[in-house]
Amino acid sequence: MTAVRRVLFVDDDTDLLAGLRRTLRLPSTGWQLEFAAGGAQALDRMAERTFDAVVSDLRMPGMDGAQLLAEVGRRYPRAARVILSEDGDRGAVIAAVGPAHQYLAKPCEVDVLVGTLERVLAVRDLIDDDRLADLLGGVESLPKPPRIHAEMLAASADPRGTLADVVAVIEQDLATSAEVLRLVNTAFFGLPAEVTTIARAASLLGLATIQALAVAGAVFGAGGPPPPSLDTHELAQRGMQVGRLARCLAREEGWSRQAVADAFFAGMLFDLGLPTLARANPAAWAAIRSARSARSADAASGQVPDLAADSELEVAHFGCSVTRAGAYLLGLWGFGEPVVAALALQPADPADPAGGDAAPAALVLSFARRAVCHPQAPQPVAPTGYLDRARLVRWQGAALDLLTDQ
C-alpha cells in the first residue's frame, strides 16, 4: 500500500490558503494537503503529525518563511522545504538560501508547483535509511574549506575585482560550485534552460548578488570544513574532467542540447555527496580510504579497482553510495530528473543483466567515471543494448582525444 504523502502549505494570507484549497489538485493516490496560517501554527501542526514537504510564503509577520524553514530543518530534516517569494525579491531569497531546498516565484503556476512537489517527493525513495535521510535532508550548506569563504570575501570586496576573479575562486571547490549552480537554476529565476557553467551562473547572478551572498555567509560559508584528508579541490578538478568527457560523448551521440547539458551536470557533480558523508562519519571515510589503498596495492596481482567496488565500499561504511547521496541532494534541490537518475543508477554496467537496461545517460556517466577515475579498469560492453562494441570503440577514441589534451 502506498504511503500517504502529506504536504503542509503555510501563508499568513488566509484568503490565499482558501484559494489553494479550492484550486490545487495534486495526484489523488496517497496525497494529503494541509494548511497553516503562519509559522507558529505550522510548527504546531508538524508536532502532531509527520509531513513530507512544507511550502511556505517567504514574507510573513512574526516568523518569516526563512525562519520557519530553518526551524523545520532542525526539527524535521526529512521534510522537503520550499519557499514561495514575490518575483524580484532576490534579497529575501538570499536569506533563505540555506533553510530552503527550493525557491519558487509568486504567483506560481499550479503545474509548476505540482511538478516541483512530485519530483521532490519522488526523490525520497532513493534513501531508505532514516539516519542518512535526516543527515542529507538537514543540509543547509555543504562542507567546504574555510579558505573559500575568506577568498570570496576578498575577491568580492576588491574594488578592482572582476567576475572572472570570483569564478576562479568558486571553481576551486565542488561544494561551492554546486551551491552556486543550485541557486541560479532555481525556478525562482525562471530561466529557459539550465545554467551549466560557473562563469554563466556568476554573470546571471551579478557581482552585487555574489557580494551579498559572500558577506551573508550563504553559499560561500557555513557547512563546516570537510575532513583534512578530503581534497575538495581535487574533487572539483576530477568532476570537471568527468563532466567534460560526458558532455563530449553526449555530443558524439547527437543528443539534444538539454541532454548534453544534463550529461555535463551529472559528471561534474557525481562526487557531490562525498563531503557531507565524510564530514558526518570521518571514521567511515578513513576506513574507505584504507580499503582503497589496500586494493590499489593488490592491483599488480590482477585486482583492478572499479566503480562497482567503490560503490560497495561506500555502502558498507557510509550506508549508501556517494552517487546515491548526491542524487538525493540534487533531487531535493530541484535539479532535473535526468541528472538525478544518472547518478542514482550508478554504477551502470551494460554487461550486467540487472543494469543492462540503464538509461544511456547513466551509461555515459559510468564510462566517463571509469575513464577518469579508473583508467586501467576494462570498460564493459553488452552484445546487445546501447553500449555495444562499436559504440565503445567510438567512446574510447573520444576519451583518448579529450583526456590527452587536458
Image (spheres, rainbow, N blue to C red):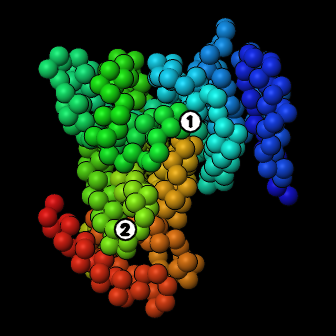
Q: Residue at x 64, y 29 (%)?
A: 107
Q: Residue at x 68, y 31 (%)?
A: 55
Q: Quadrant of residue 178?
A: top left
Q: What secondary structure is marked by label 2?
A: helix
Quadrant into which the N terminus falls:
bottom right
Residue 302 is situated, as x and y percent measured from the top left of the image, at: 30, 81
Which one is in front, 43 or 259? 259
Residue 287's place in the image compared with 144, above or below, is below
Q: In this image, 33 relative to 128: left or right?
A: right
Which is nearer the N-term, disc 2 or disc 1?
A: 1
Residue 374 is situated, as x and y percent measured from the top left of the image, at: 30, 68
Residue 28's place in the image compared with 259, above or below, is above
Q: Which residue is mark 1?
A: 102
Residue 311, disc: none
Q: Tag 2: Cα neighbours inside 10 Å, few (<14), some, or many (≥20)?
A: many
Residue 227 is situated, as x and y percent measured from the top left of the image, at: 35, 39
Q: Amino acid at mark 1?
A: Gln
Q: Quadrant of residue 206?
A: top left
Q: Which residue is mark 2?
A: 250
Residue 270's place in the image compared with 12, above or below, is below
